[in-house]
Amino acid sequence: MDIRGRNNVTVAGPVDGPVVVLAHGFGCDQNMWRLVVPVLAERYRVVMFDYVGAGRSDLSVWSAERYSTLDGYAQDVVEVCEELGLRDAVFVGHSVSAMIGVLAARRAPRRIGALVMVAPSPRYIDDDGYRGGFSAEDIDELLESLESNYLGWSAAMAPVIMGNPERPELGQELANSFCATDPDIARVFARTTFLSDSRQDLKDVTVPTLVLECAQDVIAPREVGAFVHAAIPSSRLVTLPATGHCPQLSAPEATTDAILEFLRELR
């Protein structure tokens, strides 16, 4: 199989530079990183890709069976790393991709040597002693709305997820990204994302880890960032001066600076 074509793999930066892999979240594609890449690519070899079903990936190889769990997406990551011959790459995962990175690092420990978790959430639904930010009823309602009217859901939810109401162009960009995704594929990925529970997987993380949370985030509140940080002994928690769930778009300089500082400390 042509993995590079399947996942629309693109590479920027010096060929011999340390490798940074950027992974997008639900309803998005690698274009979400465009404001971060130019600075990272000055020193690092930046690898980007689209999960199967997103962006310019090969939609013909998508299957509901494979991508109904986060393991299917983690396998995409591992296969991309293997195809490129990566060793000790720094995996930067946004939103649900933060947990996908945890699973990929466990599957291929020689391929991934560090993690950057941007606005992560191991579980979106509240539980005893845990605040994920949503009740089970909230998630049921969200998924029902998404499944019955995906375009309407996208237009309504994107500005809420993005935050920054004074910058409506950001919410519109996210809405456009959602709407560009095949609704049937989006429905499966949404259920995979919002019904996942990766809390127990965090204890297996042994690589250096940076947890980046936003000061205000309706999808991943700060209690979640604190939980992830506490669950990973090797982690460092940084609160970005950012609002919303997509700091790589709303606060690209702060996001890039935090990632660069972490990368420098690894060397």
Image (cartoon, helix red, strand yellow):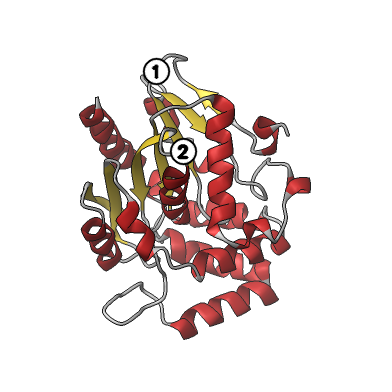
- Quadrant of the image occupied by residue 64: bottom right
Which of the two discs, 1 and 2, labels the residue nearer the N terminus?
1
Q: Residue furthest bottom?
A: 137
Q: In this view of the protein, can residue 251 be seen by the observer? A: no
- Decide if residue 263 is on the left or right side of residue 26: left
**Cα distance, mark 1 to mark 2?**
15 Å
What residue is shown at x 41% (from left), y 50% (from top)? 102
Q: Locate residue 79, reporting x and y percent.
A: 58, 37
Is residue 92 placed above or below 185 in the rendered structure? above
Q: Locate residue 182, reporting x and y percent.
A: 71, 57
What residue is shown at x 25% (from left), y 59% (from top)? 231
Name the residue nearer the viewer: 234 or 156: 234
Disc number placed over residue 22 in the picture, else none: 2
What residue is shown at x 47% (from left), y 81% (from top)? 138
Is residue 84 placed above or below 181 in the rendered structure? above
Helix, strand or loop at disc 2?
Answer: strand
The local crowd at label 1, few if under 14, some if 14 to 19, many if 20 or more residues have their Cα within 10 Å, is: few
> To which residue does mark 1 refer?
17
Amino acid type shown at disc 2? Leu
